[in-house]
Structure formats: C-alpha cells, structure tokens
Image (spheres, rainbow, N blue to C red):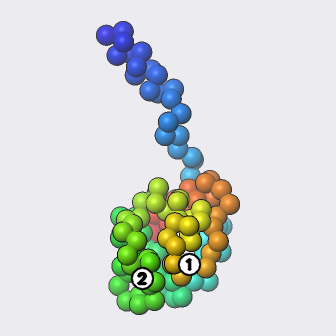
Amino acid sequence: MKLAAYLAALALLSPGDVSIAQDAQAGADLWRGCRACHAVGPDARNLVGPILNGLSGRRAGTVAGFISYSDAMKNAGIVWSEATFKRYAANPQAAIPGSKEGFSGLRTEKDAADLWAYLKQF
C-alpha cells in the first residue's frame, strides 16, 4: 500500500507531460497572421488555404470543396490534434515536406498552444 501511494505521488510530481496553459485571446491575436489564407467561424469559406473550422479530429487534406491541397498534405496521414498541430505549427515544411503552406512556423510552443485554444472554438 505504501508503495502504491509513493508511486502515485511520484507520478503527480513527474514533469513527463507538462501542459502549457492555453490563452485563446492570445491565440486570437496570433490568428491575425493566418487569416490572409485561412478562415474560421460561421461564415468561413476556403481561401488560399482551407477553412480551419472543426480542425480537431479531422484528417489532413480533407476539407470539402478545397481543391488546392498538395499531394504531400493529402497523403500525410495526419489526424489533427493538439499534438499534431503543435508539431506542424512549429515548422510546417519539416512536418509535411512538400506542402504548400507558406508560413515558416510559430516561435514558441506557447504560441502554438494559444493558437490551438483559439481554433478549437470553431
């Protein structure tokens, strides 16, 4: 019993999966750099890039009506989650070589977490 309590306490103190606090308002500010190519919200439509409504859980390269996906994006096999988004947002070309994404990446993991917090509202 003591061992189980010790292991439980150790797990609570372990930094293994430390989450970064998300700030959707800060994400909205970051979104300004994305909206030239992407849209979100009830009136969103595909632009240079696809709409990002319903991003969480969606397979990459599958937005209905968006026909400009690269073969790399269509065949990436990614299902968008917070983790896959953060990897992609840090360096899109490294995450999916050959994609058409022109953005070079967010500066910090906190920025990616904040932008994810904003996008998951839609």
The label number, if any, that marks residue 114 in the structure image = none
Q: Position of residue 31 (x, y in %)?
A: 61, 71
The amino acid pointed to by label 2 is Asp
On-image quarter of the N terminus: top left
* Circles 1 and 2: CB atoms closer than 8 Å: no
Which residue in the structure is indicated by mark 2?
71
Which residue is pictured at 37% across the width and 89% down the height? 65
Residue at the extreme left of the image, as rendered:
1
The label number, if any, that marks residue 101 in the structure image = 1
- In the structure shown, which secondary structural element does the residue marked by tag 2 occupy? helix
The amino acid pointed to by label 1 is Glu
Residue 38 visible in rendering: no
Q: Nearer the viewer, mark 1 or mark 2?
A: 2
Q: Position of residue 99 (x, y in %)?
A: 51, 78
Does 59 sit left or right of 24 as displayed?
A: left
Nearer to the camera, 8 or 88: 88
Above or below, 59 relative to 71 = above
Which residue is pictured at 49% across the width and 62% down the height? 85
Above or below, 5 relative to 28 = above
Above or below, 100 relative to 25 = below
Q: Position of residue 102 (x, y in %)?
A: 61, 79
Which residue is pictured at 57% across the width and 46% down the height? 20
Does 65 sit left or right of 24 as displayed?
A: left
On-image quarter of the C terminus: bottom left
Cα separation, mark 1 vs mark 2, equals: 12 Å
Which residue is pictured at 44% across the width and 77% down the height? 73
- In the structure shown, which secondary structural element does the residue marked by tag 1 occupy? loop
